Amino acid sequence: MSGLRVVIADDQELVRAGFGMILEAQPDIEVVAEAGDGIEAVEAARAHEPDVLLLDIRMPRMDGIEAARIVSAETACRVLMLTTFDLDDYVFEALRAGASGFLLKDVRRADLVHAVRVVAAGESLLAPSVTRKLIAEFTSRSPAAKPPARELDVLTAREQETLRMIALGQSNAEIASRVSASFRTAKVSSTSGTSGDPGDRSASRPSTYSCSSTIHPSTSPLHVRGRGKAGRQYGAPRV
């Protein structure tokens, strides 16, 4: 089995030398090249086709984020980001750029070796402090708003207005007056097996849940063309 091929990119020579010594001491890892900036890192990845690119975020000429984006798009090399800082912006940008891992430079040698092997195997790995920040960021966000339901698109604007008033709990007579419709039409739209008394607000109550869950009372009707009677679309009996 051939060893893992690694390129180390950092603008500090001592950092490159230190990481290189740690990795070269492993029987299954070979450091094939070093780079002092982002442009050299991209060129080394193209020329040597490494399994893993150890890439510092802050470098001259081209930063590690842009270098990671290019390498991830053009090659099969896995990118493992290195930095002194675990700032949120760096973490998110690195992951968006295609990085498979994110480590701080004070990482222990055993953890560095482990990270290279894990990333080379196609997995992802983050420093513990980075993981904590990502979890905290995720849990602090509000749930995304659900998109409006599309089931009512088959109704006309008048039918949707009728359903909106049903959700408000208005009586048959009130609904008929508001939409300039006959009492008969309003009754078909709102009654669901109740008394049918024109002044009885309970006639519209059974339909309130299904309507209010899709049309908010404060929302104006959607102007869409459709078919069918509102009551029949939502299970109201034919009267």
Image (cartoon, rainbow, N blue to C red):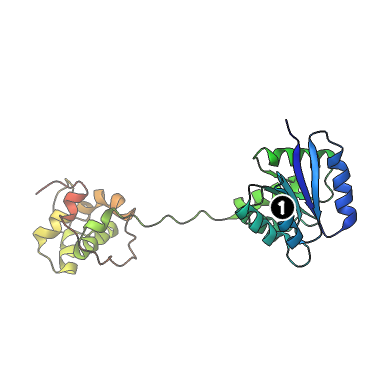
At a point 71% along the width and 38% down the height, the residue shown is 118
To which residue does mark 1 refer? 47
Q: Position of residue 185 (x, y in %)?
A: 11, 59
Tell me where residue 180 appears, x and y as whole percent.
14, 69
Give the residue displayed 69% in from the left and 53% down from the top: 46
Residue 217 image point, x, y percent: 32, 62
Amino acid on which disc 1 is placed? Ala
Residue 170 falls in which quadrant of the image?
bottom left
Q: Residue furthest front?
A: 47
Q: Residue at x 73, y 49 (%)?
A: 48
Q: Is residue 233 left or right of residue 34?
A: left
Would you say 121 lies left or right of 16 here?
left
195 or 88, which lies in front? 88
For disc 1, the neighbor class at 10 Å (few under 14, some 14 to 19, many from 20) is few
The answer to whether any part of residue 207 appears in the image is yes
Q: Quadrant of the N terminus?
A: top right
Q: How many marks?
A: 1
Q: Nearer the viewer, residue 201 or 131?
A: 131
Q: Residue furthest top?
A: 1
Label 1: element kind: helix
The spot of residue 165 in percent (x, y) is 25, 61
Left or right of 53? Residue 170 is left
